Image: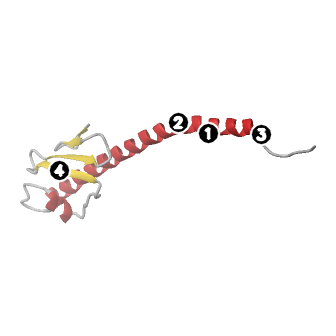
Amino acid sequence: MNKKGFTLIELMIVVAIIGILAAIAIPQFSAYRIKSFNTKAKTELKGAYTACQVYFSTESGATSCGIGGMQAQKFFNSNDVTIAINDPDMNNWTATAKHDAGNVTYTIDKNGKITP
C-alpha cells in the first residue's frame, strides 16, 4: 500500500518543538514589552522637561512650570504614562514619570539628568 501523510509520532515531535520554542519566546517577549514601556515613560519625561524649559524661556516672569505650563507648550503626555511635577519652581524643577505597565519610575532634575 502506498499511504501518504504524517505519522502520529511525527506530529507529536512537531508539537513538542513548537512548545519548546514558545517556552523560550514568551518570556523574552514579555521582557521586551516592559522595556519598551519604560522607554516610553523616559521619553515622555524628557518631553515634559523640554516643554518646561521652553515655557521658562518664552513666558517672561514665569518662575514655575507645572502641568499647565507644559500644556501651554502643546505637550500632553499619554494616558498610560503618569508624569508628576515634584517641584515646579524654576530653580529646583524636578519631575517623575512611570508607565502603567512599566516597572521603573524615572526622575529628571532641573539640568535634564534622568535617573532611574
Does 95 sit left or right of 40 as displayed?
left
Q: Is residue 89 left or right of residue 113?
A: left
Type of amino acid under label 2 = Ala
Q: Mark 4 = which residue?
A: 84
**Of marks 4 and 2, the one in the foreground:** 2
Front residue (pair 77, 10):
10
Marks 3, 1: nearer the viewer: 3
Dot 3 or dot 1: first in sequence order is 3
The image quadrant that residue 3 belongs to is: top right
Checking the image for residue 18, the label placed there is: 1
Residue situated furthest front in the rendering: 1
Distance from disc 3 to disc 1, alpha carbons, whole Å, reads 17 Å
Q: Amino acid at mark 4?
A: Ala
Judge the density around disc 2: few (<14), some (14-19), many (≥20) Cα neighbours within 10 Å. Answer: few
SS class, disc 1: helix
Q: Which residue is mark 2?
A: 23
Name the kind of residue labelled 3 in the image: Thr
